[in-house]
């Protein structure tokens, strides 16, 4: 299940070289070309799945385990102070490569990066509207 036009299919399967930090039968983890911080890496399955909603549960579980294992190793070896795990789905959410991937972003005290959002306010009306929409969906 590869997509001939997908850059991450090509990188994950070794057709395009990458700075690989971990590889097994199902995944390649390589350094991001536009790193947020020192050691920013991407966990990428060798099979093509567009996003979180297309990836089978068992592959997702292994992807999370891989992020945990490689994240721990990056944190220790690069002496990071923390790690962000980021995963984007859809252009509106910042996804620019339509092949499922998990960002591992080592964080360093005072690294100057911001990964976040501007907090809003959950009003009673908004909460009611959201819960109403969700329960309507269940029916
Ligand atoms: P997204 O925005 O889809 O969550 O993340 C895509 C990431 O892939 C970006 O951080 C971008 O820098 C990285 N990226 C895009 N093309 C390449 C590439 O050809 N090689 C590598 N190593 N990283 C890439
Ligand atoms: Zn792909």
Image (cartoon, grey):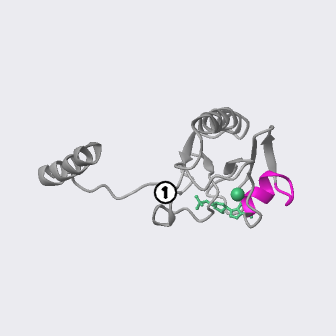
Residue 119 horizontal side relative to residue 51, left or right? left
- On the image, the x and y values in percent for residue 107 come to 58, 46
Specify the farthest residue to the left.
125
At a point 54% along the width and 45% down the height, the residue shown is 84
> Which secondary structure lies at badge 1?
loop
Nearer to the camera, 75 or 60 = 60
Nearer to the camera, 57 or 104 = 57
The C terminus lies in quadrant: top left
Q: Can you tell me which quadrant of the image ligand 2 is in?
A: bottom right
Specify the farthest residue to the front.
139
At a point 62% along the width and 52% down the height, the residue shown is 100
Count of labels shown? Answer: 1
Residue 2 horizontal side relative to residue 81, left or right? right
- On the image, the x and y values in percent for residue 27 come to 74, 42
* Residue 12 forms part of the magenta stretch: yes
Residue 3 horizontal side relative to residue 63, left or right? right
Q: Residue under circle 1?
A: 114
* Residue 63 forms part of the magenta stretch: no
At a point 19% along the width and 48% down the height, the residue shown is 132
Instruction: Determine if the C-beta at disc 1 is less than 8 A from ligand 1.
Output: no
Placement of 81 over or under 105, stated as above or below: above
Nearer to the camera, 43 or 129 = 129
- On the image, the x and y values in percent for residue 19 come to 81, 53
At a point 50% along the width and 61% down the height, the residue shown is 90
Highlighted magenta segment, given as a residue range: 7-18
């Amino acid at each position: 299940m590869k997509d001939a036009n997908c850059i991450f299919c090509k990188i994950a399967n070794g057709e395009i070289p990458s700075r690989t930090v971990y590889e097994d039968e199902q995944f390649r983890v390589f350094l991001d070309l536009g790193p947020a911080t020192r050691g920013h890496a991407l966990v990428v399955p060798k099979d093509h799945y567009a996003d979180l909603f297309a990836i089978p549960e068992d592959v997702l579980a292994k992807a999370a385990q891989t992020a945990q294992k490689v994240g721990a190793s990056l944190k220790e070896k690069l002496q990071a102070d923390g790690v962000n795990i980021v995963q984007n789905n859809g252009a509106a959410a910042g996804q620019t490569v339509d092949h499922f991937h998990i960002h591992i972003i080592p964080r360093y005290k005072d690294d100057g990066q911001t990964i976040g959002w501007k907090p809003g306010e959950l009003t009673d009306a908004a909460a009611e509207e959201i819960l109403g929409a969700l329960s309507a969906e269940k029916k």
